Amino acid sequence: MRAPRRWLTSEFERRGISRREFMGFCTTMAAALALPSAAAAQIARAVGRAEKPILIWLEFQDCAGNTESFLRASRPTAAEVVLDVLSLDYHETVMAAAGEQSRANRDRTVAERPGGYIAVVEGSIPTGANGAYCTIGGESAIDIARKVCGNAAATIALGTCATFGGLPAAAPNPTGALGVADAVPGVGNLINLSACPANVENLTALIVHYLTFKRWPPLDHYRRPLFAYGKSIHDNCERRAHYDAGQYVEAWGDAGHRAGYCLYKMGCKGPVTFQNCPNVRWNGGTNWPIGCGHPCIGCAEPDFWDRMTPFYQHLMGVPGFGAGSNIDTIGGLAVLGVGAAFAGHGVIQIMKRAADKAEPVVPNGPAKGDA
């Protein structure tokens, strides 16, 4: 008998997606996961054979920005398919069902598939007034989160509101808004994908990692995947060379701004923000804020509305220089450091040449007079 076709293969054929396009997607995912390109073949085999993942997507105190990101997966075409053909059993924004029918669908999945689905939480969870600030069908957000996340194989907190509380949790936080980790402590297999909104490519890569290796990727101390949050934006920034040379934008539209100089003085929070924006970019890889000449506002970090504001004023401290360091002083030191390095290199070369003249190299055996 002919073996039945897998769901993903069938969907590719229905949409006219070629094997080459699929392999291109797998190569992109390998790069996003910081894996060697040879891992693309392993990803292709595993994803093609995997069962369709079941997702229950919860929305609480949010602007639906992460849902908008989710609906705009576009690079490559296969990424849209992977997300679009997930068994999305519950998502208030995109599902056809409504009211009691939608809630019954959600509760049925939770009851019949304990440990067999992935919970996605978008938005912060209010805890004030016994959860009355956010209710859906008469149930509070906190009660829904406890029920759904408590039975999930894993919970993905998507976006900064779900991970760290985001804007609703900014001082004075009148609703008692919290991220998932604080609102529902003890949730197993919690993965945070912070950013405002989270990049859909990181969500895709996270799910592909799970389908390929049957486990979740290594996480940082904020429970964020290291493949997406393991390095600071500053480390991968295309303007990093200008920072090292002490070349900064001093005013919007000045010569340095037009030349692509570092945006630190204009408020860029790249040195203290960890995310892979410079690599995956946005809008199908078209560009990203710093590439457009706008500073990073640190949206992937905890309490960024309180800690990173004012957005257009630079931080007083730079990692490695102390909290009170001034950026102009650092820039001057950087220039002096480069000059000193060149001077030191010159001295070393002069000494080396003098030594070479004093002791010529003899390629075939010891020098004359040696024992």
Image (tube, rainbow, N blue to C red):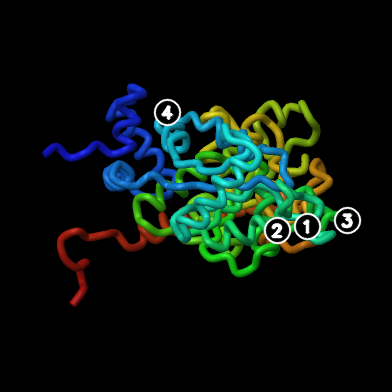
Instruction: From the viewer's side, name the closer residue of 366 and 316.
Output: 316
What amino acid does circle 2 point to?
Answer: Ile
Q: Farthest residue in the left direction?
A: 1
Residues tagged 3 and 1 counted as in contact (Cβ below 8 A): no
- Give the x, y percent position of residue 342: 56, 50
Q: Which residue is mark 2?
A: 142
Compare marks 3 and 4 and give the one earlier in the sequence: 4
- SS under mark 4: helix
Compare marks 2 and 3 and give the one earlier in the sequence: 2
Compare marks 2 and 1 and give the one earlier in the sequence: 1
Compare marks 4 and 2 and give the one earlier in the sequence: 4
What amino acid does circle 1 point to?
Answer: Gly
Dot 1 alpha-carbon crowd within 10 angstroms: few under 14, some 14 to 19, many 20 or more: some
Give the spatial CA distance, label 2 vs label 3. 20 Å
What amino acid does circle 3 point to?
Answer: Pro
In the rendered view of the protein, which quadrant contains the C terminus? bottom left
Q: Which mark is residue 77?
A: 4
Dot 4 alpha-carbon crowd within 10 angstroms: few under 14, some 14 to 19, many 20 or more: some
Residues tagged 2 and 1 counted as in contact (Cβ below 8 A): yes
Q: Closer to us: mark 2 or mark 3?
A: 2
What amino acid does circle 4 point to?
Answer: Thr
Q: Farthest residue in the top direction?
A: 16
Q: Farthest residue in the bottom direction?
A: 371
Q: Which residue is mark 1?
A: 131
**Residue 298 seen in this snapshot:** no
Residues tagged 4 and 1 counted as in contact (Cβ below 8 A): no
Q: Which residue is mark 3?
A: 172
- Give the x, y percent position of residue 343: 58, 52
